[in-house]
């Protein structure tokens, strides 16, 4: 039996190793168009590679995928984050968990992951063909022909493409492509003086996109150009299509204190006003906000940071409360989040059986990784999808009986 894996990224390597492991008699050939395999693993997680996330049930894991979560639940029941940890541990690579559940190799070096995958593939007898792009696949009954060689099964792990034409060869085989748009980006706010606070983190905000149902809660980081941080990045992922449609021009409405109950926020403010009557506003903040940011909000609300709370008028107090709960920012444009960038879009999920990763359109063809219309939020979820789909595609690609369409 001969199995071709196209694309030597995270998903392709994992698929090839899994195929070799589960089908020791098969010949596994891994094609890579460029001169460098695992290039994204190298730069991932700021050079540390956020391998997975300490989220240990298929149901909980699947909630982190704006596209494909429902389908991935089936695949995660075969290989999930605990399996990833075990897989790397068996090969001598231990992972550690950070406070926000992201998992990295204990070396904090992505090269550790690359070395592990390369060695595992070599030991499994995977034949690597570098600088060998696959441009077309011909399907003839039970066989696929690519680069003048016949294969019994093919695993496509070619990653995302910013242009829909990058998927033409899959369209030629009958597949439909969900048009690609970027996911995981930060918001640009040109001309807004909030950027003077660059580097400040507001620990628990709720960011809403006006005119949509999109809302996310979490830390917000003020950047050179506007805003980033987990709440913004999650919004960019869940709203990838809607935000592309409005050409990244919209109003972000921000609740800086993460409190949705207005009465509670109002009571906390009144309590501070009563308790710290003689203290300056700048020195007595009722909420968990960095001092620099608190002073900025006070000024934006027209309150003097240097005057005592007892001199604050009702009007000023109401303006401040409103500013804390409903502060608005015009967003115009986006910036790629370089720590972890993905494309949403790719092979339509309905055309793939996620229990096997086999195409429903071209039996014998399997998919793994970002080539699918599947993407996760930040935190190691994109690699987890690559490991999971790669593992399952590799395992099941060698089973001839799976070629039957359901
Ligand atoms: C800067 C950056 C940092 C990231 N950090 C993280 C992180 O820390 N954690 C996380 O979970 N996710 C992270 N991601 C996302 C993650 O890297 C991707 O989701 C993941 O790499 C997808 O793996 P893949 O194998 O599907 O695709 P890719 O990694 O894109 O690999 C596809 C491979 O296929 C090859 N190829 C394409 N077409 C052909 C062809 N026709 N013939 C032969 N070969 C072909 C490509 O050259 C490439 O090597 C990051 C992404 C970026 C860009």
Image (cartoon, helix red, strand yellow):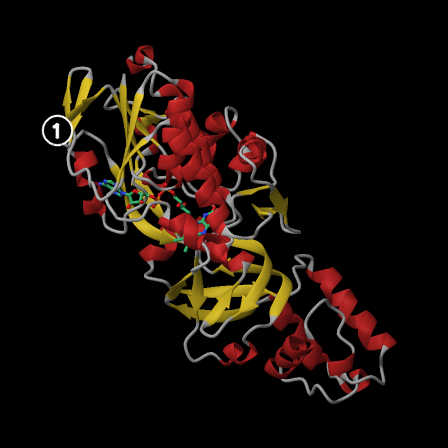
Is residue 97 among what the camera can see? yes
The residue lying at 31 percent from left, 48 percent from top is 36
Does residue 281 appear left or right of residue 178 in this picture?
right
Q: Quadrant of the N terminus?
A: top left
In percent of width and height, residue 256 lies at 62, 66
Counting every numbered tag in the picture gives 1
In percent of width and height, residue 61 lies at 55, 36
* Residue annotated with mark 1: 148
Does residue 2 appear left or right of residue 257 in this picture?
left
Q: Is residue 395 above or below residue 382?
A: above
The residue lying at 61 percent from left, 72 percent from top is 323
Pick whichever, 371 or 405, lies toward us. Answer: 371
The residue lying at 55 percent from left, 57 percent from top is 231
Is residue 239 among what the camera can see? no
Residue 263: name its quadrant. bottom right
Q: Quadrant of the C terminus?
A: top left
In percent of width and height, residue 169 lies at 17, 37
Q: Is residue 1 above or below residue 193?
A: above
Does residue 147 appear left or right of residue 331 in this picture?
left
Q: In the image as oriented, which residue stretches furthest toward the top?
A: 401
Pick whichever, 180 or 31, lies toward us. Answer: 31
Does residue 257 appear left or right of residue 126 in this picture?
right
Residue 321: name its quadrant. bottom right
In percent of width and height, residue 173 lies at 18, 29
Q: Secondary structure at mark 1?
A: loop
The residue lying at 22 percent from left, 44 percent from top is 131
């Amino acid at each position: 039996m001969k199995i071709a894996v196209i694309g030597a990224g995270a998903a392709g390597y994992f698929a090839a190793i899994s195929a070799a492991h589960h089908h020791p008699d098969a010949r596994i050939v891994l094609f890579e168009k460029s001169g460098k395999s695992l290039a994204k693993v190298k730069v991932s997680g700021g050079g540390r590679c956020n391998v997975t996330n300490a989220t240990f049930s298929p149901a909980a894991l699947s909630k982190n995928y704006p596209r494909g979560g429902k389908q991935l639940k089936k695949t995660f029941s075969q290989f999930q984050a605990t399996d990833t940890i075990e897989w790397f541990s068996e090969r001598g690579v231990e992972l550690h968990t950070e406070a926000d559940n992201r998992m990295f190799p204990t070396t904090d070096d992505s090269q550790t992951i690359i070395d592990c995958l390369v060695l595992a593939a070599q030991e499994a007898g995977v034949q690597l063909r570098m600088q060998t792009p696959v441009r077309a696949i011909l399907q003839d009954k039970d066989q696929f022909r690519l680069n003048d060689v016949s294969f019994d099964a093919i695993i496509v792990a070619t990653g995302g493409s910013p242009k829909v034409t990058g998927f033409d060869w899959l369209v030629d085989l009958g597949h439909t492509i969900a048009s690609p748009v970027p996911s995981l980006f930060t918001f640009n706010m040109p001309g807004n003086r909030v950027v003077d606070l660059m580097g400040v983190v507001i620990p628990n905000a709720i960011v809403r996109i006006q005119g949509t149902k999109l809302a996310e809660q979490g830390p917000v980081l003020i950047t050179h150009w506007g805003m980033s941080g987990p709440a913004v990045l999650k919004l960019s992922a869940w709203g990838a299509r809607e935000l592309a449609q409005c050409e990244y021009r919209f109003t972000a409405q921000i609740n800086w204190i993460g409190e949705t109950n207005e009465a509670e926020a109002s009571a906390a403010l009144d309590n501070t006003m009563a308790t710290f009557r003689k203290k300056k506003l700048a020195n007595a903040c009722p909420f968990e906000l960095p001092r620099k940011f608190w002073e900025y909000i006070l000024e934006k609300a027209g309150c003097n940071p240097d005057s005592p709370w007892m001199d604050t008028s009702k009007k000023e107090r109401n303006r401040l409360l409103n500013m804390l709960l409903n502060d608005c920012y015009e967003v115009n444009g986006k910036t790629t989040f370089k720590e972890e960038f993905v494309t949403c879009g790719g092979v339509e999920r309905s055309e793939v059986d996620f229990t096997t990763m086999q195409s429903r359109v071209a039996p014998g063809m399997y998919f793994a990784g970002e080539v699918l219309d599947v993407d996760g939020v930040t935190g190691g979820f994109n690699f987890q999808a690559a490991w999971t789909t790669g593992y399952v595609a590799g395992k099941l690609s060698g089973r001839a009986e799976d070629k039957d369409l359901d």
